[in-house]
Amino acid sequence: MGEPRVGEGIGAAVRRVEDARYLLGRARYVADIGVPDELHCVLVRSPHAHAVIGSVEVGEALASPGVVAVFTSADMAADDVGPMRALWVIRSADGRPMAEPPRFALARERVRHVGEPVAAVLAVSLPAAVDAAERVRVDYTPLPALTDARGARESGAPQLHANAPENVCFRWERGDGAVVERAFAAAAQVTALDLVNNRLVGAAIEPRAILAVPDAATGRLTVYDSTQTPHHVRRFLAEELRLTESDLRVIAPDVGGGFGYKGKHYPEETIVAWAARRLRRPVKWVATRAESFLADNQARDHLTHAELALDRDGQFLALRVTTLADLGAYVSTFGAAIPSAIYSSLLAGPYRTLAIHVTVTGVFTNTLPTDAYRGAGRPEACYVLERLADRAAAEMKVDRADIRRRNLIPVAAMPYKTPIGPTYDGGDFPRVFERALELADYRGFASRRRAATPGRLRGIGIACYVESSGVAPSRFAGALGARAGFFESAVIRVRPDGGVQAMLGTHNHGQGHETTFAQIVASRLGVPLTKIEIVEGDTDRVPFGTGTFGSRSIAVGGSALDRAAMKIVAKGKAIAAHLLEAALADVDFADGFFTVAGTDRRVDFAAVARAAYVPHDYPLETLEPGLEESAFYDPPNFAFSNGVHVAEVEVDSATGAVCVIAYRAVDDIGTVINPMIVEGQIQGGVAQGVGQALTEHCAYDPDGQLLSGSFMDYALPRADEVPGVVSEFDESQPCMHNPLGAKGCGEAGSIAAPAALANAVLDALSPLGVTHLDMPLTPERVWRAIAQTKE
Ligand code: MCN
């Protein structure tokens, strides 16, 4: 905290050092890595959403040119390959653990979603594997499919798993229902809404890819994987393949975007790793874009009934939320935790709601599993609250800004314990709110609306959010059933020439870690950026770590790095004291120099580094040679980023097309390490929020066939649909419990943008009497709503 904003350290808008590699085509993704003798894996995937697997005929495929092996679940079972387990096992309200149906990498007996892998073909070339895969004959007996969460709960619905009666995975409950009930009974106003949080597909530029390379000499297996969490993958693979973690090295090299969905464990990882060991040959699988739609986790898909009780002054008295969350066919890595623990714990948002009660039922359907995707649980919570706030304001004929203003938690109330669980350590929500309204010229909006071109309906929308970034305190996760810790690790190795190598368990797949983490080192050690190397994504070079998701890298990884740097300074002082023949207590360190207090005697960092490895005259009993330190960090709490986003839109009343005219954001992410990078992070998140709000929707037909299985049908926003974000940061409230004072920023945009945009579009349509529409607000949906008002 409190670093000068000069040069290259904390607070400087340094250009991303990794961009040269990305922009010049020099990045190395998994698909770029070729090894001699590698086999290509093509997966035979189920064309049915739900079916019993009869025989799987592989003879013809095996006889195809270039084919080395064709495997089915029977082969994996014969090798005793274990099932894929979730990383987080939550408990239902009655205390019972969630249903965790067995999920095998190659489906056994039954398939439960279109695209589920049934057989793996291994051949010497990709075309040979593709051809042979078409010759695998699977005898399926189709079963009725379930593709929506409500249908899964109906009596007589097909049952997906023997150990999940009524297709229910869990029934989650938080808050005091009786207190909420009483508050509703006494309320002057009750506002209710039914909301759909649309299903999304992650769409990184690089499709997932895996290459597993066995080492005949050591018996070890190296797995190159386009993942955000190499340490989790190592652990899952060790468990399933009955290995120790030391038998495996997982490397996540350059990864072309992750957005959360690449931070989960997938069947292909198990299949490729196992096949490589079994065949004693390198095996590579690279998803095609079409395959990504059938193989990658999807996200959101909530049906929610939400009610807000208010007094006559518009104070929020109580919130009651009932959500049906579609988990898809199996429980994915974090699939159960996102719609329960993560989502529900943010339902207070920035507001002082006195009582909150939430129930979430997680159900299975014949669709791709859902799991974390940028925002993960927090956009859903923000959407519920911000849609309710707007609706309540309209019903009470109060200005939308005023109703929020009356309910924001004041800074004096910090730390603030919410009625739904978390304690916010800090944040000046009213200050951020007023600044955002000022930036958006909220007051001047009425005149802009009046001045709009005829046929253009202008609207403005506000969304306030609180985000639990810095996922997660292990204590919190453990209490709620996580099967892993969520610490982060950092090692700083100082070279004899004074250069620094910093190794972290996080992973950079577009967030700019090689720059921002180097800035932290530069600030703490006074070493220029050109002499700092950041290493991530290799379980041999970074033995223990957790990975990048939940906007945790700065708050948790950065804090581990900061601690390691402090240890380097402490050791450096001891070396300097020896070199300068001074008492340790008299040695100070600043700006790259160790100085004897009150004198001009000093030695620079590089000289201390050199001496650390040339200990000719060291007092070896008290001073170890070398300059290398490690630190593990586990946060005591989440870092509660917060902010206010304001979107201004125009709706073409003839076509229903929505144009985002302006987008302004004020975010409190504590101490900003690199303002240029965080601006980019906010902009990227907003782009994804624009997608959810306006264009993206993953749709299945009633038989479970994916209707939006390509970019022709699944509409990512295009550059001309994404507004330039005017972004500001409020640094007045640094995180109180981590050494950097930093809170995460990677998901902020995707959390606030859907609510801000939906509120803006509905504001534009409000003069016509349209009060609710579900996302995505496509031209067709908006046009139909307008047309109906004319009927
Ligand atoms: N940062 C900073 N000052 C702060 C907070 C963050 O300078 N106060 C910097 C960090 O040092 C880091 C970047 O901003 O370089 C994002 O930091 P953080 O908020 O800690 O998020 P993570 O690095 O943990 O990234 C994860 C987050 C998530 S969960 C998703 S999903 C996501 C995202 O980041 N996926 C992304 N941003 C993405 N950006 C790109 N380009 N690609 C993805 O796949």
Image: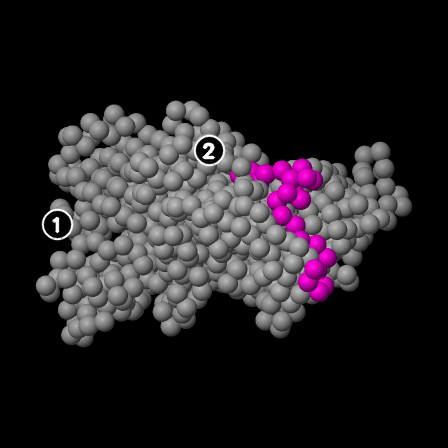
Image mark for residue 162: 2
Q: How many marks?
A: 2
Image mark for residue 646: none
Q: Is residue 666 toward the left or the right of residue 73 in the image?
A: left
Foreground residue among 501 and 77: 77
Q: Is residue 414 toward the left or the right of residue 494 in the image?
A: left
The disc labelled 2 sits on which kind of residue? Ala
Residue at point 62%, 38% (across, down): 82
The disc labelled 1 sits on which kind of residue? Lys
Residue at point 55%, 52% (across, down): 138
Q: How far across and down, in percent of the image, does residue 171 sit?
A: 37, 32
Circle 1 residue: 397
Q: Which residues are magenta?
A: 63-86
Q: Secondary structure at mark 2?
A: loop
Residue 655 seen: yes
Residue at point 39%, 47% (across, down): 145
Q: Name the quarter where the C terminus is drawn.
A: bottom left
Residue 538 seen: no
